[in-house]
Amino acid sequence: DDGLPAEEVGPWSQEKYRRVGMYSEIFSTGMKNHWQRRVYLDLFAGSGHAVIRGSRRRVLTSPLLALDVPDRFDRYVFCDEDAERLSALKTRVARMAPAADAVFMPGDANATVDEIAAHIPQHGKGNTVLSFCFIDPYGLDIHFETIRRLGSNRAMDFLILLALRMDANRNWATYLQPSSDKVTLFLGDPTWRPRWTVAEQHGHSPTRFLAEEYAAAMTQLGYLTTGLDRMIEVKTYDNNMPLYYLAFFSKSARGDEFWDEVRKYSTDQLGLDV
């Protein structure tokens, strides 16, 4: 315990951290000789440390796992709307890797997306840029327009936590109300309601509907098709209750190959402990 803030998380969060840590490592090492600049973005970065609920165990979270890879990214962009957590992360990054090129963006990523994008180096001849963006919201809090602005005209892989059970399922009746724009902003499409009516008639759950709609929207941005079978469903350890999906999106078959490696081989062997 270094005296700085740390998020309290359920033990199942370790699986999420292992997956993003392993992909960061495969991506940064596998692409270092193919692109001039590799950029890591974390839009809900947090403080860099988490304490496992019900224990004293303290683990590294996504930003510091991405910083701790053997072949570091050329730039890191960390965003969080909690100023105290972002300040703690800045201190920990300086301690772990004082020479790292790291940018810290306070505020809601949806509101500051243009500023975030401005910190991604300009791609061009002799300065090719490949990015990996991890998005870990507590609910349906990432707007699809944010994804569109970051990924439309760039080479960028996304790993997105889709909080479809722990948010969408619990609040579906509220989100169905005409006054709610939550799902519209999440999918970037105001015409989703009639498609939900059809899906419901076919016996589909809100979780399946939203996952398939999201994947289809990413395909329209030029990303390769991603089905539910390629998403990782994370469940609670105590009663095996589904919580969320980890959904990966890439425009490159190589990215999908890397993700297949993570899906198959991400295990407890990846160290998380501080």
Image: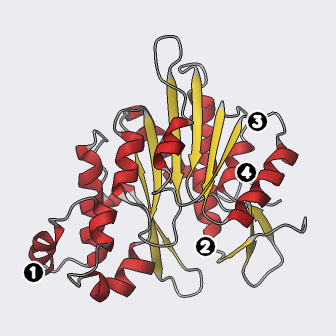
Seen from the viewer's position, the closer of residues 1 and 125 is 125
Q: Is residue 191 above or below residue 255?
A: below
Which residue: 42% across, 32% down?
155
Residue 64 tag number: 4
Residue of label 2? 12
Q: How far, Cα to Cα, is label 1 from label 2?
A: 33 Å
x, y percentage for residue 77?
A: 62, 44
Residues at marks 2 and 3 touching, judged by CB atoms closer than 8 Å: no
Sequence order check: which comes first, mark 1 or mark 3?
Answer: 3
Check disc 3 and give the amino acid type: Ala
Residue 201 tag number: 1
Check disc 2 and give the amino acid type: Trp
SS for tag 3?
A: loop
Query: In which quadrant of the rendered image does the C terminus lie?
Result: bottom right
Q: How far, Cα to Cα, is label 4 from label 1?
A: 45 Å
Q: How far, Cα to Cα, is label 4 from label 3?
A: 11 Å
Sequence order check: which comes first, mark 1 or mark 2?
Answer: 2
Which residue: 29% across, 55% down?
215
Q: How far, Cα to Cα, is label 2 from label 3?
A: 30 Å
Pointer 4 local density, CA inside 10 Å: few below 14, some 14–19, many at least 20:
many
Check disc 1 and give the amino acid type: Gln
Sequence order check: which comes first, mark 4 or mark 3?
Answer: 4
